[in-house]
Amino acid sequence: MPNNKLKITGGALNSRLLTFFNDDNLKPTKSYIRQSLFNVINIDNNMICLDLFCGSGILSAEAISRGVKKSILIENNLNICNQLQNQFKKLDIQNYELHKMDVIKYLKCSDSKDYDLIFIDAPFQGNLLQSTIQVLDDLGYFKKNSYLYFEQNRKDYNQKLVSIISKTHNIIKDLSIGDVSYTIAQKRDI
């Protein structure tokens, strides 16, 4: 299987390449969406990031490159995890934890729910995105969260997900590009 490359678009690792495992279910976030995302988020060096269904790891690599304190990556595929660890080592990224496990299981057993930035890039097939957002909401992950980002298939766009997020967050962007709809939300001051 050939590998693919992604370019980090900003920060200390700007223009460095991340090679990711080629898997049909992997759909790394496109560079123009990443730029849009990180133009909106006010990154500071105390932020902790949670990257669910991390896949290529590009969202965490971008966040770390731009100065987040640490990123926690969750991925269930062993081959993808191995590739990700090798790539982060090559890029000398050290401020991360990678957990090879099911996302829902991780969310239910995690001791910490304090993540400033949460990325959700679930596979388009199935209802993993909806299940994940519902579990995050039910278990209180949104209480201290500052920013939330998720992607969904444009043809299966689910307004209910935006409604769930809208209870605690302001929707900053809810756009579609190609076959991807993406949503960026910021926690409301209560």
Image (spheres, grey):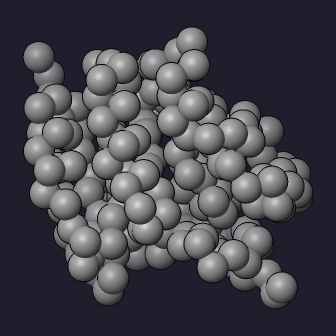
Quarter location, residue 42 = top left
19 vs 158: above or below: below
- Left or right position of 142 against 67: left
Which quadrant would the C terminus be assigned to in this image? top left
Q: Nearer the viewer, residue 10 or 101?
A: 101
Residue 108 pos. (x, y %): 51, 23
- The residue that appears at 42% across and 67% down in the rendered structure is 124
Residue 1 pos. (x, y %): 83, 85
- Left or right position of 148 against 171: right
43 vs 187: above or below: below
- The residue that appears at 26% across and 57% down in the rendered structure is 183
Quarter location, residue 116 = top left
Residue 18 visible in the current orientation: yes
- The residue that appears at 14% across and 50% down in the rendered structure is 160
Q: Nearer the viewer, residue 124 or 113?
A: 124
Q: Nearer the viewer, residue 127 or 177?
A: 127
Residue 38 visible in the current orientation: no
